[in-house]
Image (cartoon, rainbow, N blue to C red):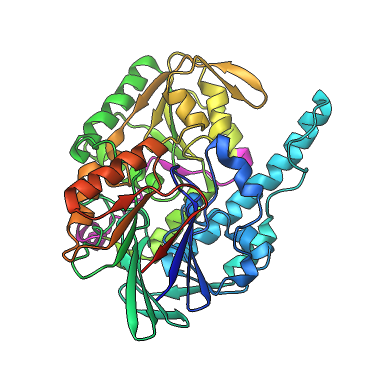
Amino acid sequence: MKIKIHFLGASQNVTGSQYVVEANNQRIMIDCGYYQERALQDRNWEPFKVPPEDLDAVLLTHAHLDHCGLLPKLGKEGLRAKIYCTSATGDIAKIVMGDSAKIQEEDVAFKKKRHKKAGREAKHPYVPLFTVQDAERVGGLMSYVKFETPVRIADGFEATFFESGHILGAASILLKIQSGGETRTLLFSGDIGRNDVPILRDPTVFTSGVDYVVMESTYGDREHPDAGAIHDQLAEVVNQAHRERGNVIIPSFAVERSQELMYYLGELLEQKRIPPTMVLVDSPMAVRVTDVFRRHPELFDEETMERLSHGNHPCDFPSLKLIRTVEQSKAINSIHGTVIIIAGSGMCTGGRIKHHLDANIDRRENTVLFVGYQAQGTLGRQILDGAQSVRLFGRQKEVRAHISQIGGFSGHAGKSELLHWITSIESKPRRAFITHGESEVAVNFAREVEAATGVPSVAPEYESEYELE
């Protein structure tokens, strides 16, 4: 049996997840993500290494931008095959892709105007990478699957989706390939979540035989603080803001992280551990994703289902305000007294968070609170790493606000949790490919996986390919 796997993204870097498996004269793509690291964003404009029209199926692990964000470009450039994913992933991905397209269209118009005024030339043409129409069109190619239900996706290919515990609807995908009486199985981890987090079920532990593993290593070099400390840390930040009469600005991913924040803040307010505080979710996408949560209670964990049975939704409390319009967003800056502003994007690479940073980051009484991973080269990473000034809307802005971080929020498994995930596979895989981590992290974690399991492990380089026996 001849199988090839191509590593076309998230290879010794964190975003842009994309792999292609070839066998039986079929080509299957797993994920098609957008590059968010500033140094790698030019890759978003490059032609696909495998022509979209030559793909026989696309499998989508989950709906984060770095996994689904280039699907509209894939469709625009010729994809005709089905995109297989869970229904919750499909619902959220359509929101994420549409929002990304809208931001790109708006950014192109803004940059064209600003560059013309400054007499500058653009690095890329004054056109968006893809449009809202492109995003809507590719959404029509989605075919929904159920967890733990095998689906034939191409000649000799069968895919089964399992709960990964990362975000609502997120999956690890077991790909079974049959040819000439032989069978091989490839397990794609997607992003692996954590046990015992609010709302979501725990990630699946695989005990049956797997021949090859492609797994993420985002936090392969560190452990997370105890998630139980989140209440204490969050309360401390909010109470300090009240004492200093400042605002709390939280860059947050619209998918899952914003909903978790609502869950924790609602509990703190209910327990009176923080003063009555207006919480503003200024992200139309987060608002729409919250609606998806309401449509998929079957994916909630037992604790959340118990809460629902008593009439308490995990994303509701009296002082929560969901901001939908631009006018409502602009009016936030006229509010007096401490407010908590949750806005995207989570790495500060675009969206309304940049406007709130522009209005708040140079005031000492305010706090910028990070609750998610900040990739190298992103604005969020610059701020978190202690930049004294940052560029916002074409001008430098001094960073005077408090900069805080709560690590326990992460939707990614920490180092020991990742090792537990792969060591739980009872029959030893033939090989493990470690992806979706910064270069040094992925390379070192591959060594640790090999030491812990005895499985030959490697961190593939960008555009590398391997033949699997």
Drawn side of residue 15 relative to residue 180, left or right: right
Whether residue 351 can be seen here? no
Which quadrant of the view contains residue 179?
A: bottom left
Numbered label tally = 0
Whether residue 193 can be seen here? yes
Which residue is rendered at x = 54% and y = 57% of the image? 95
Quadrant for the C terminus in the image: bottom left
Q: In the current view of this chain or complex, which residue is farthest to the bottom?
A: 181
Q: Bounds of the magenta span?
A: 301-327
Which residue is rendered at x = 49% and y = 23% of the image? 336
Drawn side of residue 301 relative to residue 176, left or right: left
Picture layout, residue 446 above or below residue 301: above
Which quadrant of the view contains residue 48?
A: bottom right
- Image coordinates of residue 303 in percent, x first then y, are 20, 57
- Image coordinates of residue 139 in percent, x first then y, are 58, 67
Which residue is rendered at x = 19% and y = 46% of the image? 451
Picture layout, residue 263 above or below residue 229: below
Magenta stretch holds residue 314: yes
- Image coordinates of residue 59 in percent, x first then y, are 46, 67
Which residue is rendered at x = 75% and y = 47% of the image? 127
Quadrant for the N terminus in the image: bottom left
- Image coordinates of residue 346 in percent, x first then y, are 46, 39
